[in-house]
Amino acid sequence: MSVDQVRPSANGSAAPSVRPPAGRPAKSRTRHSRRAGRWWTPWLFLAPALILFLYFKFIPMANAITMSFQDVQPYLGNKWVGTDNYATVLTSDGFREAAWHTIVLAVGQTTGCLVLGLALALLMEGQSRRLGVIRSAAFLPVVVPIAVVAELWRIMYHPTGDGMINSLLGLVGSGPSGFINDPHTSMASIMVTGIWRGAPYDMMIFLAGLGSVDRGLYEAAKVDGASRLQRVRYVTIPGLRSVFSILFILAAIRGLRVFTEVFLLTNGGPDGSTEVVMTLIYKLGLEQNRLGVGAAGAVLLFLATLVLTVCVHLFRRRGNE
Amino acid sequence: MNKPWLTGAGILTSAVLLTGCSSSPAGTQAKQNPDAPLELWIRTTPGGPGEAATIKLAGGFEKATGKKVKVTAIFDDFETKLQQRAAQKNLPDIVLNDVTQIGTMHSQGLLREIDLDKIKSSKDITAQGLASGKSVDGKQFGLPYSAQASALMIRKDWREKLGLKAPQTWDEFAAMAKAFTAKDPDGNGKQDTYGLAAPLSTKRGYASWYFSNFLWAAGGDFITESGQGKYKPSMTTPESVKAVQWFRDLGCKDKAIQPGSVTMDTPPTNETFEAGKTGMYVVGPYLIPRFDKSLGKDKYEVVPMPKGPKDATVLAEGGSVYLMAGSDNQAGQDAFADYAVSAEGQKLGMQGTEGYIVQLPVNKTVDISTVRPDPRWKTYSDIYSASGRYAPSIPNWTPVRQTTAETINALVADCGLDTGAKLKELDAKLKAVLEEQGIAAS
């Protein structure tokens, strides 16, 4: 509320000083700029932030793009190699599989997180004080460092009958499963770990979104004789539309850049069954000390993320129209 | 309309240019100053015992020669940080890093050639140690200062309980692994022990690193030199195939390798040995202090690896002294390298119970038992001299190690795969790697 009230007046004083609207009489412009100070005053205020951005974001990004076209050997001098680095990444053994695995993992984790997150949010919506404790407990996986999460799941995924999850499976008469150690189950196991970690984050955002759904609609639906499931289907989910789209973008970006949990749990193994784009780039670029190749991989991933984000935006805009 | 934008951008650009000018260009031949302090980088944990030991060695060098050394310990992203210094054309004078880094550092032009005539003690270095510091073109670009080799650690109490003797052949090795798996050596009534502890993750090429101890003993090889610095892949030779099959059977048929091995690097594998889940482990001497503390000195023993189909060759590794290019004190660099490999430097580097940087001496005139009376160290030292073999110094060894690790990992993880077909695939990949590095034999 307060932000909305403040914004128009702030715009009113700053914006014209940067770009005076065309066609305004010259006299009024000079008077106006005298009141607002020199034209460069806003730049001066922006300068600290801009310089920081320039040094820590834009220059490194430009460097990475340059490096992606070079054979990087700082001491001898970098050599231009054209698109060789891109060719190395794109034709490397297993790139196509890695790209496919990344998509599978991204789709699986995103769906799992959204579904589980929504379910948790619906279960935990409400004002009761006890719910706060449970919500915090449910949120814990998000704040635990990923290295700890990976170690925890490695223990839970112990591939013999006395392993934690395997002993549970044993109770219902199945298993033992190899989990991350078996090429056939490793991908699903990593996905479950990712969902376990990501779902509570989605839950929190859903909870915030649920608060903004008009209570009156629920009551109206109830009066109309809608069942509980129908209320969720026709009131809650449409009401959470914007939340869904933001979570979808965040999750998709996170999904494409998935690295740490894969690196720590399997490093792309066994038998390359969990190799994703980031672990492949890490191997080709950093472990082999070929920074140009690493940069090329990073640029490719950046482009993919950009395309995805733009697509989701377009899709959303069309949906809104 | 655009003017403010342009000027704003202009201010920022000039700010960038001004700071950009501060790095000074440096030629490859810097002006020499024999009194300039030497800057030394070592890949070890900052503040850890490794750093303290390096400072001690640098202290000994200062006392012997009067030249100053400034030690910097870096562990994470060591290579990247070195690249940053390379970009500034201002490398440290000396780098102590892994032997296998020679190819990468040399091909990046970071190293200067070492003139062995100026290093008096170089004549005392073991033959294979000296060879490990030669680049693919046969020139000396590194000097080993510390060596390691692999030996077999066995749970002594388990072996005695089952009435076995230390294995002398591969058959006995496999039999012991099987017995440790099936015969409940810890006597808890449960089938929860395994023979061999093996880190077979693809991370940093662990699977390949571990398997080299078996591959070489069988007479196989990852790549074979075919003269004039050219190599050809050799994972499909009968010897290599046999070694892979034998090792794979340990895991797939006998189930004698710890479960989960294919996603384990060394830390969790060490834990299986410490926790009494595994009874045999092929590793270097650096784990002795740790296992003495966690497991107890009396619980395990160190024996040489049994003779394989060919011999008892094991993987040798270690650290090398690298003299970096562009130094303004080349005389100082030579002096430090000479001190590090001299009998005095080697003995000083071995002192201490945890904080030592010389694992096994590379200097033939140094008897390890004069510094470390524990006979297990002598065992390791003898194995290194007699059977230690380094990875070849090709321009970049990492891709070879990664690629082979992936195949070994796959073969142990999925027992349904066809060994021959998978190794054929591997050879094709290795050929591509060698071609890319320009060292493939036609």
Image: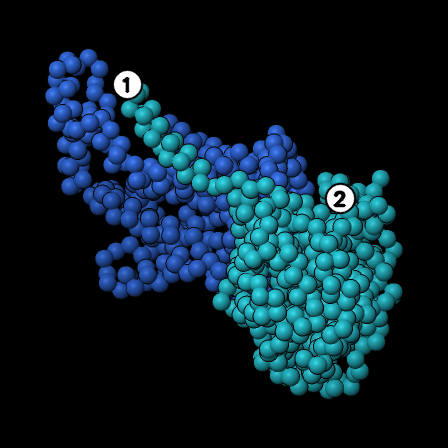
Chain colours: A blue, B cyan
* Residue B242 visible: no
Q: Earlier in the sequence, mark 2 or mark 1?
A: 1
**Measured from the top left, where is residue B37 in percent x and y?**
54, 58
**Measured from the top left, where is residue A271 in percent x and y?**
67, 52
Q: Mark 2 touching mark 1, by CB under 8 A?
A: no
In the structure shown, which secondary structural element does the residue marked by tag 1 occupy? loop
In the structure shown, which secondary structural element does the residue marked by tag 2 occupy? helix
The label nearer to you, 2 versus 1, is 1
Q: Quadrant of the N terminus of chain B?
A: top left
Q: Read off the residue under disc 2.
A: B434
**Measured from the top left, where is residue A156 in percent x and y?**
53, 66
Q: Quadrant of the C terminus of chain B?
A: top right
Callout 1: residue from which chain? Answer: B
* Amino acid tagged 2: Leu
Tell me the crowding category of disc 1: few under 14, some 14 to 19, or many 20 or more residues within 10 angstroms, Cα based.
Answer: few
Front position in the image: A112 or B396: B396
Callout 2: residue from which chain? Answer: B
Front position in the image: B330 or B21: B330
Q: In the image, what residue occupies the spot 80% across and 63% down?
A: B127
Q: In the image, what residue occupies the spot 51% across and 34% down?
A: A65
Q: Taking A263 as reference, is B256 above or below it? A: below
Which quadrant holds residue A75? top right
* Amino acid tagged 1: Met
Q: Is residue B10 left or right of residue A217?
A: right
Mark 2 to mark 1: distance in Å? 58 Å
Q: Read off the residue under disc 1.
A: B1
Front position in the image: A155 or A299: A299
* Residue B112 visible: yes
Q: In the image, what residue occupies the spot 63% across and 74% down?
A: B348
